[in-house]
Every structure is written in C-alpha cells, then in structure tokens.
Amino acid sequence: MRRNRVERLQELLRAELGSLIQKKLKDPRVGFATVTRVEVSHDMKFAKVFYGVLGDEKVRKSTQIALERSAGYLQREIASVIQLRCTPRLSFKLDESIEGSIRIEEIIKKIHSEKETE
C-alpha cells in the first residue's frame, strides 16, 4: 500500500514539476530542462528530482544553480497543488542517462553509415 502511494507521488511530482519549470519558472539561467524522474524517500519528506538539459557544460551548470535556488519556490507551488501533510524537500540532480543514450545512438548511426559505404 505504502509503495503504491510513493510511486503515485513520484509520478505526480514529475508531471507537476515539469510543468512548473517550463511555464512558471522565469529564471533565464534555466535552459531547456525536462524532469525525467523523481525519487521520493519512503517517509515522503525528501524528493530527488532528476532532470535533463540540452546544451553545453555552461548551460548545465547555470541550470543546476537556478534550480537549486528556486527549490523553495517550486516546493511552495507543489504544496498549493498537491495536498500533503508535509511537502517533500526538493533536491535536483542532473540525469546523464539522456546524454549516454544520445552518444549510443550516434555510434549506431556511424556503424550503419560505415556498413552502407562498404
């Protein structure tokens, strides 16, 4: 029962935070960031928000700083949308799996193009 509740909260947080970051967060340092997943602790007091961002290292770093500084604002906005006894404290982590999958895709394309030229 508790596990299902945590999973539902994770999915709800992912959707709401993604929407808030895209629509309400007006910080120019935030690049094109998308929330990929959210991990909520078992006691539902903490949430790790994993995000992906397109751009170079400078854009990633500025997005990280902007998201960390706007954590309080985002937490208040979540509290107004989701009725919980305690809104989880948010922390942001860069999800590097997107970049890994892009690199793998590029390698596969390169292999296919080499086979076609043979």
Image: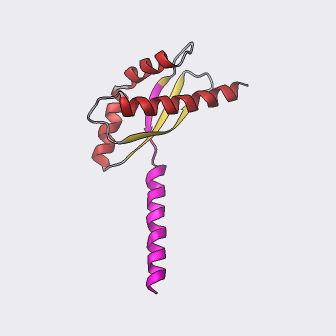
Kindly identify the residue that appears in the image at 56 percent across and 15 percent down: 84
Q: Is residue 40 visible?
A: no
Image spot of residue 81 (x, y percent) = 49, 19
Image spot of residue 105 (x, y percent) = 47, 63
Q: Is residue 117 above or below residue 80?
A: below
Q: Which residues are magenta?
A: 90-118
Image spot of residue 14 (x, y percent) = 51, 33
Q: Taking 13 as reference, is 42 left or right?
A: right
Q: Is residue 13 above or below residue 118?
A: above
Q: Quadrant of the rendered structure where residue 61 is?
A: top left
Q: Quadrant of the N terminus?
A: top right
State the colouring used for the structure image: secondary structure
Q: Taking 66 as reference, is 79 left or right?
A: right
The residue lying toward the viewer, choosing from 110 and 41, is: 110
Kindly identify the residue that appears in the image at 34 percent across and 28 percent down: 25
- Residue lying at the far right in this picture: please name it: 1
Q: Secondary structure of the magenta portion, mostly?
A: helix
Kindly identify the residue that appears in the image at 35 percent across and 36 percent down: 64
Kindly identify the residue that appears in the image at 57 percent across and 32 percent down: 11
- Residue lying at the far top in this picture: please name it: 85
Q: Is residue 113 above or below residue 73?
A: below
Q: Is residue 114 magenta?
A: yes
Image spot of residue 114 (x, y percent) = 45, 79
Q: How many marks?
A: 0
Q: Is residue 62 magenta?
A: no
- Residue lying at the far front in this picture: please name it: 23
